[in-house]
Each structure stands twice: as structure tokens, then as C-alpha cells.
Image (cartoon, helix red, strand yellow):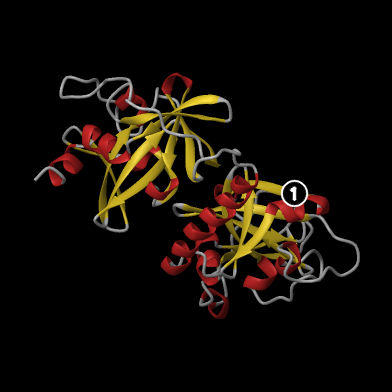
Amino acid sequence: MTCAGQRFAIPQVNLIEIVRVPAAARRERFATIHGAAVLRLRGHLLPMTALARALALGEGRGGPSEAELTGEGASEGEPRDATVVVLQADEQRYGLLVEAVHDTEEIVVKPLWSVLDELGCYAGATVLGDGAVALILDSVGLAARAGLLDEVLAGEQEQAQRELVEEPARRRGNATAGPQRQYLLCRSAGAERLAIPLAEVSRLEEIHASRVERMGPQEVIQHNEEIVPLVRLSRLLGGELGAGARAEAPGEIGGELDRLQLVIHRVDGRPAGIIVDELLDIIESGAPVQRPAARPGVLGSLVIDGQVTELLDVEGALRLGTSSFSKEHTR
């Protein structure tokens, strides 16, 4: 790939996908919150940076700049299409704005000169098939250099995700007489739609199934040196509770998915997670909640977008489905 007229290489093991955004769609796909640029990608908000900016090569020479994409800078001439490569850096994904992506090829990695090795954003160098020299980018080092792995930015990114997703939700929210509330819509097994009050959501995560561990019958993950107990929503609402319930292997949902959608809730500063089968949308609604609830773990039901939707009792569900949470909150 090229950036500011220079050629670079990325190991395919770190490359998730290549996203090309037409100039006409830039306003809908890019935004900036608290100084951090993000890309809207299939319902998720992806932190991003321009390669030219991260390496101080001079933005906008061969393609649109980061500020130009997010509307904070003027376009030079006609608006240009954007090319973003989505990279994996440890457990985090991010977008890297580049000038162009050319081809894939097998290369021989050469060691770096010490002065470049100290920068931390290069993994080596290589000689391409046409004889040109290209530096190999280190996805983790590059993300750290751009500030995408900072804990402070992570917190800002969570707030950015909430603000950016809530704005279109407010625009298309249901026109009802009651007070408007934001809900996270999700789906459990059997195509059931459930709503979670957005105020009850600390953050959303997509994790690899291999991160799920067991402490006795309880599934957990490690996050920021904390042990986070998990409950699977499909199992909870399917009635498979108690010691005699069938237990999936860690990370298993029907033996098929290797990535899990996780809703994190905090009580008294302690996190617990709910694994859902699918995250659908965030929407604003003033529909009244009709009680009583049809089953444990549910507060009641309401009509959203013309469909009956159950309202999840987040703390009740966690008490039912996670032994550690239940013991902690029934003392």
C-alpha cells in the first residue's frame, strides 16, 4: 500500500478487511468525538487514524486527510474516495486511512536499522518484487503511537460510541406520548427481541470466544485485571438454569461462532457481562412498559417499531445467571 507517496507493507495476519468509502458517503461513515476519529462499520464504531498523520508524513498529499473525512477540514478540489484498512492490534480493532492498497505478495522480512526500531511502529523491512524497499508496519506499535490503545481514549471511545449511535436513534425514534428512553435492542435464541435500557449498559464488546474461561460452573473473562462473570441470555431465557443445566464449553454458542457479543453492566463499580446472540440497534421510544412480566429475568414488554419486545431486567438476569453476582448482592 502507499501513503504520501511512500510504500508500506502490512502482515496479512493483522489485516481484517479493506473498506473503500465513496466520497458521497463520507459524512455518514466518518465522525470525530473528543478529538478521536471514528468509522461507522456495520453498526459498530471503529477508532481510526490516518497513516500519514501517525507517521508525520503530511496528510492529504495522495488522498483525503482525516480532518477532511470527518468534516473538520476543507477538501482540496473535488471530494475524494477514502481507503481504510481494518487492522487487529491484540484485542482491539482499528481503521488505518491510507492512500491506496495495491496487492498481496510473499516477502522476506529484513531486520530494521536501530534508529527505526526505536520508533516502535515498524516490524521490519522488505524488498518488493519490483526492487522497491517497503517498511513493514507493526499494527500494535502503530496503534500505540496514534494513541488508540490508551485507557483514557478507550473511555472516550465508549462515550463517543454512545453519542454517535444515539444521535441517529433520536432522529428515527418512535413518536409517542410518554417520556423518551433509549434502549439497546438485541436478539436471543429463537429470534426473540429484547430491549435493554441504555442507561444500564456500561459498554459493548465483541470478544473472541477463546477468552471465555470457567470457575466451576461459572463462565468468566478477564478484563483490565478484573474477573468478569458472564451469563448467556439464550440459556437464561431458555430456562437452562441451576446445577443440572447443560453447560456449554467455554466460548461455545452452538459450536459455530468464534466471536461473542457482550453487554457489560456495572453495579457498585463491579462488572458483569451478558452474552447476546445479536446486537440489533439502539433506539429511542416512549412506549409504556406493560406488566407483569411473562418470565423471570424480564421486567415486562413494550411495543417498539410495531413489534412486541421484552424488557430485560438486567440485575435480575445477572442474579439468576451468575452465582458470584447473586452471592455478592444478596448478603
Q: Report if residue 104 is visible in the image.
A: no
Mark 1 residue crowding within 10 angstroms, few (<14) / some (14–19) / many (20+): few
Q: Is residue 157 left or right of residue 238?
A: right
Residue 284 figure quarter: top right
Residue position for label 1: 20
Q: Report if residue 146 is visible in the image.
A: yes
Of all residues, the one furthest to the front in this rendering is 177
Q: Is residue 107 left or right of residue 181?
A: right
Residue at coordinates 30% horizontally, 33% vertically from top-left? Answer: 250
Q: Nearer the viewer, residue 297 or 225?
A: 297
Q: Is residue 238 left or right of residue 65?
A: left
Residue at coordinates 21% horizontally, 20% vertically from top-left? Answer: 245
- Where is residue 258? Give x, y as percent: 44, 34
Badge 1 element: strand
Of all residues, the one furthest to the right in this rendering is 77
Residue at coordinates 83% horizontally, 68% vertically from top-left? Answer: 75
Residue type (three-letter) at the residue carrying disc 1:
Arg
